[in-house]
Amino acid sequence: MTDCLFCRMVAGEVPATVVHETDRTLAFRDINPQAPTHVLVVPKQHHPTVAALAEADPDLLAAVVRAAAAVAVQEGLATEDGVEPGYRVVTNTGPQAGQSVPHVHLHVLGGRDLTWPPG
Ligand code: 5GP
Ligand code: ZN
């Protein structure tokens, strides 16, 4: 989709600070970080929401989650076999949840205590 911001980032038309990449996923730093680590993980293929992705391509959804886990390890938020210190994976769906880019993305947040419930 040529008018989709994250498709354009995947295509290299909009600059991104890429921290992790696979053949099917891209992870880059959020432009407006809400925590010391705030990385967005996207499938390279356009799907609007996590539910749409799960329906269309569950293997790709799993690849996006694996990429988020790899980012967490890379950023020092977890170890390969442990969950310390920990991190949060968030995906917003729809306007009331604050989804502002209609290309599914996982927020990987960490590096500080994260309050619960989220706002
Ligand atoms: P949402 O609000 O849809 O859950 O998340 C979209 C995220 O994309 C926001 O956290 C926002 O800061 C981030 N974002 C918006 N535009 C850009 C951009 O041009 N570059 C990067 N790296 N992040 C962006
Ligand atoms: Zn897109």
Image (cartoon, rainbow, N blue to C red):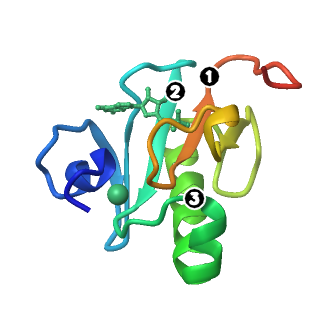
* Amino acid on which the number 1 mark rests in the picture: Gly
Q: Quadrant of the N terminus?
A: bottom left
For mark 3, does the 10 Å Cα neighbourhood hold few (<14), some (14 to 19), or many (20 or more) residues?
some
Tell me, yes or no, if residue 91 can be seen here.
no
Is residue 14 or residue 81 the one in the foreground? 14
For mark 1, does the 10 Å Cα neighbourhood hold few (<14), some (14 to 19), or many (20 or more) residues?
some
Give the residue at the far left of this rendering.
13
Write down the residue under mark 1: 111
Q: Quadrant of the C terminus?
A: top right
Is residue 19 or residue 58 the one in the foreground? 58
Residue 48 percent location from the top left of the image? 50, 60
Q: Which mark is residue 49?
A: 3
Give me the C-alpha separation between circle 2 and circle 3.
23 Å
* Amino acid on which the number 2 mark rests in the picture: Thr
Write down the residue under mark 2: 37
Tell me, yes or no, if residue 82 can be seen here.
yes
Provide the secondary structure element on which disc 3 rests.
loop
Ligand 2 located in image quadrant:
bottom left
Give me the C-alpha separation between circle 2 and circle 1.
6 Å
- Answer yes or no: disc 2 within 8 Å of ligand 1: no
